[in-house]
Amino acid sequence: MPESKYSISGIKNGISILFFYHEGRMELPNNELPINLDEQITSIKKYVVFRQKKRMRDFLQYAGYFRVSRYGKYLLSFVGNLGSKPKQDMLFQLYEFDVALRTILELYCDKVEIRFKSALSNAVSIKTQDAGFYLEKEYYTPSKSEKDAKTRRNNVSYFQRFFKSIIDKENYLRKDIMRYPELKEYRKGGSRHDNCIPVWAAFAYFDFGTVTMLYSYLRGDLRKEVLCYAYSKEKYKKEATKQVDTWLDAVRNLRNYCAHNSMVSGMTSSVVIRDKNDDVNILPRDTDLFSRFYALKKLLAAKESENLRIEIQRLIKRTKLDIYQLKILPENWKELYENITAF
C-alpha cells in the first residue's frame, strides 16, 4: 500500500493547515470531534434560553444538532428586534412554521416542474416533429449565443459533457429492467426496441435540473416556442427566455431545499431577474425567499398561483410566530405578490 504524502497548503488565522494525500486523493484534516446529547443541549444554550432540558433533548434527538443550531443561529441574529435572547418556545415555533412552509412550497414546486416538463416536451416535439429531439445536437445552441468569447467557450465545453449525460440517461432508462419495467417495449424484443425513448416518457424520469439545463441550451426559436405553448402571450423575446432561466433555477433550488428539509426561512439563493412588465418595486430583493414566491407565481397557472397565496396566508395566520419581526417575508408580501403580472 503506497505511503501517504503530505504538504502544508497555507496558513489560516496564524495556523498552518496540513493536507494529506493518499493514493493521489486529498484527505482533508478531521479536527472536529462528535459531541454527545448532553453536550449538544449545553451548546444550544448559545442561541436560546431554556431551563427544562427534556423538550430540548427530545427535539435534538429528532432533528439533530446541526439542523437545530441553524434555526437557533437565525433567531439569535434578531436579538435587536426581539429585545432579548429568544426562548426555546420561539425556536420550536420557527421550526414548526418552517416545516409547514416547506410542505406547501414543495407541492407548488412540483406543480411547476410537471407543467414545464409537459410544455417543453409537447411544444418542441410538435414543432420539430421529432419525439427524440432531446438526443439530437441540431436542436441545441452550445454557445447559448453569448457574446463574450470566454463565456461561449465555457458554455460549449460544458454542453459536450451535458449532452453526453443526456445520451447516458436515455440508455440507462432503456437498460435498467428492475427499476423501469414499464419501458420494456423499448428494450430488445419489445415492439419499439428500435426507437429512442420519446421525450414525453424520458422527461417523466429525468430530474428537474436536467430538464431546466436542457431548456437553457435549446435553440432560441425552440425556447420561445415552449413559452408560447405554456404561458399567456403569443410572442416572447429572447430577454424573456433568459428571465425564465432564472425563475426555473429559483424553483429548482427551492425544491432542493424542501426535499432535503433545509431551512427556507431566511434563505438566500440564486438571482431572480424581474420581468420588465412588473413595477421595479415588486421584487425588493432578488435572492431572498420572496423572490422564490415571485418565480413560482410567474411559472404557475393562474389558479395555482392564487391557491399558493391562500395557503401561505392561512399558515401565517395560524402560527404564533411573528414572521415579519424575523424578516422571513416582507410585511407587504401579499400586496407585492398580487401585483406580479401574469407571464
Image (spheres, rainbow, N blue to C red):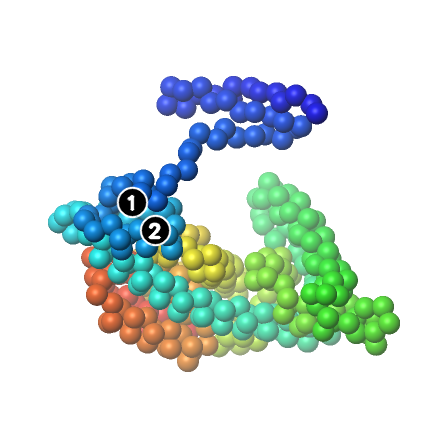
Residue 243 drawn above or below residue 27: below
Which picture quadrant has residue 115?
Answer: bottom right
Q: Is residue 87 left or right of residue 242?
A: left
Between 150 and 321, the residue placed more toward the observer is: 321
Which picture quadrant has residue 177?
Answer: bottom right
Name the residue at 56% across, 24% down: 20
Q: Residue lying furthest bottom in this view?
A: 303
Mark 1: which secondary structure?
helix
Image quadrant containing the C terminus: bottom left
Residue 151 drawn above or below residue 233: above
Name the residue at 59% across, 29% down: 26
Which picture quadrant has residue 151?
Answer: top right
Residue 48 drawn above or below residue 224: above
Do callouts 1 and 2 mark residues in contact (Cβ within 8 Å)? Answer: yes
Residue 31 drawn above or below residue 336: above
Q: Is residue 188 left or right of residue 142?
A: right
- Place of residue 88 in the rendered image (x, y in percent of width and height, measured from the top left): 22, 53
Callout 2, which amino acid? Answer: Leu
Q: Which residue has dot 2 on it?
A: 60
Q: Which residue has dot 1 on it?
A: 41
Q: Is residue 196 left or right of residue 13?
A: right
- Place of residue 71 in the rendered image (x, y in percent of width and height, measured from the top left): 31, 51
